[in-house]
Image (tube, grey):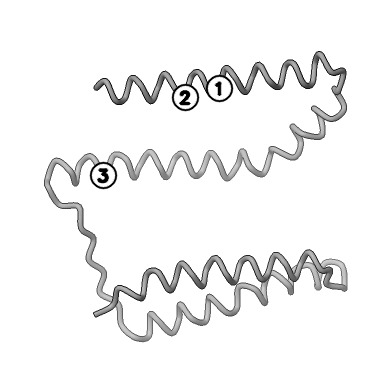
Amino acid sequence: MSAKDLIIEFLNTVFIIIIIGFFIVFFVAGDRFEQFGEFMESLIPFAVFGILFLVKLSANRYQLKKRRREDNLEIVLYLTYSHKLISDIVVYLLPVAVIAIPMMATGRVDFIDILQAAAALLMIYFWQRFLFKKER
């Protein structure tokens, strides 16, 4: 391991120790065990996606190291205009799906559902714009 990796590992360890210490003081010393249980239940979806993200990140780090050794860091994609049209369809149908799912489940759409659809639209729109503004 290089010195840079050791420093990053040390900072990660210190950060984790500080967070664990904060949670012990806040929940145990503050007598908030019910809130702790609710907090742990709310972390389950984050943990599932977090584990998937870490697995993907690990694979990408391996690929990055391999490409760095080969001095080949560029990725070239050959897309046609039909790919862009499909991307546009996904961009504008995702918010519709975000609104349709609660509509089918509960029979109504709340303000929070509209906010989630708007957030999804903005995130995917700006990501698509970032990718396709590089076209030649």
Classify 62 as above or below 125: above
Indicate which disc residue 12 carries. Answer: 2
Report, in whole angstroms, how far the alpha carbon at label 1 lies from the one at label 2: 6 Å
Amino acid of disc 3: Leu
- The image quadrant that residue 11 belongs to is top left
Report, in whole angstroms, how far the alpha carbon at label 1 lies from the one at label 3: 26 Å
Q: How many marks?
A: 3
Amino acid of disc 2: Asn
Residue at mark 1: 16
Report, in whole angstroms, how far the alpha carbon at label 3 lies from the one at label 2: 21 Å
On the image, the x and y values in percent for residue 90 come to: 53, 76
Quadrant assignment for the N terminus: top left
Which numbered disc, 3 or 2, marks the residue that appears first in the sequence? 2
Residue at mark 3: 64
On the image, the x and y values in percent for residue 135 come to: 28, 77
Amino acid of disc 1: Ile
